[in-house]
Amino acid sequence: METYAQVLNYAIPFFILLMLVEEIAARWMRVEVNRGVDTISSLSSGFTNVIKDVLGLTIVILSYGWLVDKVALTEIKSGWLLYVIAFLAMDLSSYWVHRWSHEINFLWNRHIIHHSSEEFNLACALRQSISNIFSYFNFLLLPAALLGVPTEVIAVVAPIHLFAQFWYHTKLIDKMGWLEHILVTPSHHRVHHAINQQYLDKNYAAIFIFWDKWFGTFQEEREDIPPVYGVKRPVKTWNPFLINFQHLALLARDAWYTRNWWDKIRLWFMPTGWRPADVADRFPITGVEDVYAYQKYDTRLSSQLLVWSWTQLAITFVLMLYLFNRIGDLSFIAILLYGIFLFVSVFSFTTLMDKSPYALATELVRSGLGLALIWWQQDWFGMSSIVPYLNYLIAAYLIFSPLVVYYFVRTECRDTAEAKAPSAPHSQIAS
């Protein structure tokens, strides 16, 4: 927990720096890659994912350590070959986990968040799941386990493998020549994120594109088919918590309402998007048919509300980094309560970004929780020992924030139907 938090202290600012570089380059190239509210949603999702990981809210069904202890046939002592084998085994495992997450109904819930952005940029790479509470795919690392790759090596390779998937989430890099035959490039991954019929369920690989070519899931990006991004059943919210559990809620509802007991069981394991015929008739759900006529979700925030949303995101970011830097000095219960406060913070300001009528209620819960934590500790998790009286400033902010939210609810959230009017069609944006 503490080691991972320290890694994130460096990784997260580095990712944000790269996003700033992408935005500067996009403006110089006169290409639009970011929408402010979408970027806030993406960053918020990234925050929730790393907070969940730091809190250790994942149950490992089968650990790699147990697997290597039981099945290792040999042992590679040391050297570069050890890390090459570990990296290739990790990449092959990633391909199949990724593919099954697209192809199996209940697994799609853990991956939909990553595809939920209707933009394609470095920020959308940070849209990672908090719904994957159970980890049960370590058996895919069997090749590494058979060769006796130590657990410590897998622990080193895993974050490197994950972070190496960040850079290719961009529209600014064109095809990359001979590298297109070896690595996953931005061109390959634009195909993967697209909802065009020709591109659906293609290019699952994480680092090496030859897995897709070997297993028959490769598709090259075509100039005559510009990619359109998102999911076939648009999520229509900026709130990462709602996105994370939206598909799961649909599956649970279908399982409850279908009259066929066999359908109640099998729908979880059927291909993604499959629904029992009786509930599909009773509760139809429309998806995107014409990708170029589809209109992106847009709540049309005023410039003042957009600035406030960025401010809330920045404050949450600073408080999150403070947790990561002090995690070794806090008790488990204090870390857990701090994490809950950060979760509620993200839920609150993204609810306001949706212009939801519940925005004020969620902000009051957040403010009340934060003030209760200050009263409980007579401090903000030891912050006054670093900067005297800073806890009073945090308390003042927690009192002031609901007043601002009340103002926006009164001025911008009255007519949510009008507020959620769609933006320009993809075809207009592309032109």
Image (cartoon, helix red, strand yellow):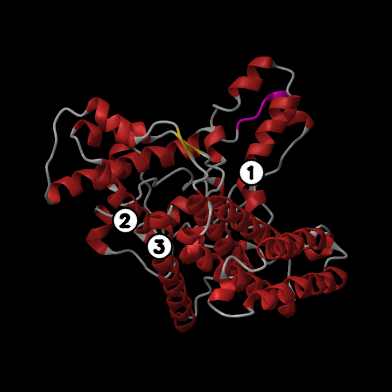
Report if residue 422 is visible in the image: no
In the shown orientation, is residue 301 left or right of residue 5? right
Percent across and percent down for residue 413 are: 83, 66
Residue at numbered disc 1? 245
The answer to which quarter of the image holds residue 260 is top right
CA distance separating discs 3 and 2: 15 Å
Q: What residue type is labelled 3?
A: Gln
Give the number of the mark in front: 3 or 1.
Answer: 3
Residue 421 to residue 153: above or below: below
Determine whether the residue tagged by mark 3 lies in a helix, strand or loop.
helix
Dot 3 or dot 1, earlier in sequence: 3
Distance from disc 1 to disc 2, alpha carbons, whole Å, reads 28 Å
Q: In this view, does 368 lie above or below 431?
A: above
* Residue at the top extreme, as displayed: 261
- Asked where in the image residue 240 lies, by quadrant, the reply is bottom right
Q: Give the range drawn in magenta.
A: 274-278
- Towards the viewer: 149 or 189: 149
Q: Residues within 10 Å of mark 1 (few under 14, many from 20)?
A: some
Asked if residue 146 shows in the view, the reply is yes
Mark sitting on residue 160: 2
Judged left or right of residue 414, residue 281 is: left
Residue identified by numbered label 3: 6
Q: Does the magenta stretch include residue 359?
A: no
